[in-house]
């Protein structure tokens, strides 16, 4: 048996509770990981509230959480890349969840080795925000030296700036720009008089918010601009009216991307600083606050 945060139906009709449940058993290509750290992401709240059920219908009871770090304690007979005792991190599929627990079972393709310079709390902050940032940058394929506009100042935007700054001339459009100060990007407020000139010279935009900032850059965007959105898809009629190429990027776990992020994060500040930690017995209260919006920022489970 093990302890885990469990929901028995979509919130708020039901509530999250820490309960005892059966410990996972690996199939041929699975690994069992003893959770050392696991992170809440905005997606976890959307999943539990049923906001994403058209794309990701959940089976209940459901254990929230996709991003985790820990140690391999068991594995299936066909697992070759990982050994018992390996320090790893990874991301479960959203419909599977399972990270806010003492153990998690995932396919070996969903984890990567964690280098010695990368602690578990930092590693668990990476898979979803930095992973989707890297995937969106890959989709945009912004040429070397070309300008790149990123909207927002959250974890995805932060990771995108760091991942792109050595290749592109990076601009960030957003509120609360001080959160990304000193990372190597040019910071642009929505009312900045230079915004129009910046947007018209930019053919690649990474939209991490899908909020009011979208209308701000669309007022100046040039035709054929490539926009990659990671929060919500841009409305088809909006993209057509602006005559731009718009695509929605949703993260699919990629072992190669995970390993790349681990290497970068060992020496560069990919993860958002100032994360708050909690223990498993506090998980229900923390998750409720995360879902209802009373708690902001990054919250990380730590198991001792």
Image (cartoon, grey):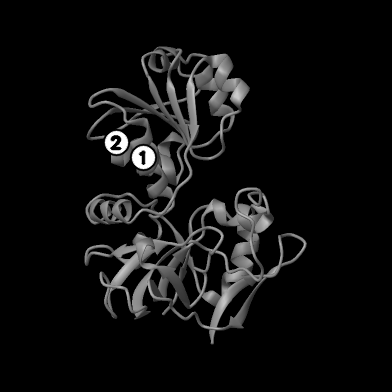
Query: In the rendering, at what x and y percent does residue 7 appear?
Result: 66, 69
- Label 2 packing within 10 angstroms: few (<14), some (14-19), many (20+): some
Tell me which residue sits at (52%, 69%) in the image: 98
**Spatial separation of the CA atoms under disc 2 and disc 1:** 6 Å
Badge 2 vs badge 1, beta-carbon distance below 8 Å: yes
Instruction: Give the number of the disc on residue 164.
Output: 2
Tell me which residue sits at (59%, 82%) in the image: 21
Query: In the rendering, at what x and y percent does residue 104 appear?
Result: 46, 73
| In the image, farthest residue toward the right | 13
Can residue 183 be seen here? The reply is no
Indicate left or right for 159 with 4 as reference.
Answer: left
Q: Secondary structure at mark 1?
A: helix
Indicate left or right for 182 with 34 as reference.
Answer: left
Residue toward you, 23 or 151: 23
Q: Quadrant of the N terminus?
A: bottom right
Q: Secondary structure at mark 2?
A: helix
Q: How many marks?
A: 2
Query: In the rendering, at what x and y percent does residue 237 appear?
Result: 62, 21
Tell me which residue sits at (43%, 78%) in the image: 26
Tell me which residue sits at (63%, 61%) in the image: 58
Q: Which residue is mark 1?
A: 160
- Label 1 packing within 10 angstroms: few (<14), some (14-19), many (20+): many
């Amino acid at each position: 048996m093990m302890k885990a945060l469990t929901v028995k139906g979509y919130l708020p009709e039901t509530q999250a509770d820490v309960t005892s449940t059966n410990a996972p058993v690996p199939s041929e290509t699975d690994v069992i990981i003893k959770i050392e750290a696991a992170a809440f992401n905005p997606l976890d709240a959307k999943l539990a509230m049923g906001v994403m059920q058209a794309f990701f219908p959940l089976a209940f009871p459901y254990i929230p959480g996709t991003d985790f770090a820990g140690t391999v304690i068991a594995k299936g007979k066909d697992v070759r890349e990982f050994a018992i005792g390996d320090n790893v991190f990874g991301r479960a599929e959203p419909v599977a969840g399972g990270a806010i627990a003492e153990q998690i079972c995932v396919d070996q393709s969903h984890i990567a080795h964690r280098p010695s310079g990368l602690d578990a709390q930092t590693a668990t902050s990476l898979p979803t925000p930095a992973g989707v940032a890297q995937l969106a940058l890959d989709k945009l394929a912004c040429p070397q030296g070309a300008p790149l506009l990123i909207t927002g100042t959250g974890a995805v935007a932060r990771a995108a700036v760091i991942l792109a700054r050595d290749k592109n001339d990076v601009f960030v459009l957003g509120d609360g720009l001080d959160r990304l100060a000193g990372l190597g990007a040019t910071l642009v407020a929505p009312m900045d008089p230079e915004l129009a000139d910046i947007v018209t010279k930019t053919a690649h935009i990474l939209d991490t918010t899908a909020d009011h900032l979208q209308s701000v850059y669309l007022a100046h965007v040039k035709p054929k601009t490539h926009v990659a959105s990671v929060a919500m898809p841009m409305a088809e009629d909006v993209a057509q009216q602006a005559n731009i190429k718009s695509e929605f990027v949703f993260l699919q776990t990629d072992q190669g991307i995970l390993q790349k992020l681990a290497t970068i994060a060992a020496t560069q500040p990919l993860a958002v600083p100032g994360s708050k930690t909690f223990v498993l017995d506090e998980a229900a209260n923390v998750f409720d606050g995360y879902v209802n919006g009373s708690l902001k920022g990054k919250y990380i489970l730590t198991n001792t």
